[in-house]
Image (cartoon, rainbow, N blue to C red):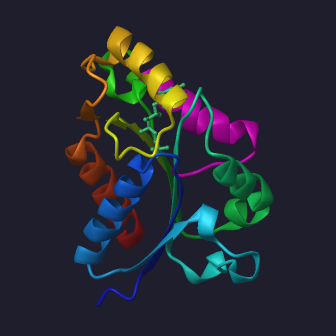
Amino acid sequence: MQNKRVIIFYGTRYGSTEGIAEKMAEIIREKDFTVEVVNLKNLPKDKIPDMTQYDGILIGTGIKIGQWTKEVKKFITGRKEELNNFKGHKGFFVSSGYAALPEKYEEVKIDYTKNALAKRGVEVDQYDAFGGLMDLTENSRMGWLEKKILKTVGKQSLGLKSETDSYTDLRDWEQIEKFTLEFVNLILT
Ligand SMILES: Cc1cc2nc3c(=O)[nH]c(=O)nc-3n(C[C@H](O)[C@H](O)[C@H](O)COP(=O)(O)O)c2cc1C
């Protein structure tokens, strides 16, 4: 047992970031770390974890019209001091449709992570942008308007199929694994 503890906080609208957070937890647990995964939407006000108990913190969010989820915004703003005083390793990631486009990747990586964090006065040690899950099936958590927006944008620039029921997973699991292993190594060094 490494005796190291990591907590992963995430905000998701349609489940993509949740899947990434769970995969990261699996990878980190394989390294014998203790990992907790917290959906910020379900975090009770009286159960706020004490961050000083952890060696690493990961925070992830989905993107909608250029914006993080409201829970992640609230968390980053509300716990700014604690995050900036945190002695361990901090990572931040987003799941975004545009992150899967090579010509847009660098721009959204900086905009949705580093710049958006700087706007709120928070710095992290590691950040990245991962592609998203475009679930237009009947099981999707998206409403009809969201599906409509995604279909239009998706057809134009993300290479999605035009059929209403398409399911396109643009998350790059190798990229996610590389980021996570780097996170683990930085805690261990
Ligand atoms: C209504 C809507 C708006 C979106 N806006 C953006 C956007 O502005 N930029 C982007 O990169 N991706 C955008 N996306 C794609 C999402 O970021 C992508 O589906 C992501 O995986 C969502 O993560 P989540 O399921 O964890 O919330 C949008 C998707 C929807 C449905």
- Please report the residue visible at 37 percent of the width from the left and 18 percent of the height from the top: 154
- Please report the residue visible at 63 percent of the width from the left and 32 percent of the height from the top: 115
- Residue 20 falls left or right of residue 123: left
- Tell me if residue 175 comes above or below residue 183 in the rendering: above
- Tell me if residue 15 comes above or below residue 155 in the rendering: below
Magenta span includes 120: yes
Magenta span includes 142: no
Between 10 and 180, which is closer to the camera in this rendering?
Answer: 10
Residue 168 position within the rendered picture, expressed as x and y whole percent measured from the top left: 25, 33
Between 130 and 114, which is closer to the camera in this rendering?
Answer: 130
- What is the number of callouts on the image? 0
- Residue 117 falls left or right of residue 36: right
Residue 50 position within the rendered picture, expressed as x and y whole percent measured from the top left: 67, 80
**Quadrant of the rendered structure where residue 128 is?**
top left
Q: Main secondary structure of the magenta part?
A: helix
- Please report the residue visible at 55 percent of the width from the left and 69 percent of the height from the top: 88
Residue 14 position within the rendered picture, expressed as x and y whole percent measured from the top left: 46, 46
Q: Which quarter of the figure is the C terminus placed in?
A: bottom left
- Please report the residue visible at 70 percent of the width from the left and 54 percent of the height from the top: 76
Residue 13 position within the rendered picture, expressed as x and y whole percent measured from the top left: 52, 46
The stretch of residues the image draws in magenta is: 106-125
Q: Which quarter of the figure is the N terminus placed in?
A: bottom left
- Tell me if residue 134 comes above or below residue 34 in the rendering: above
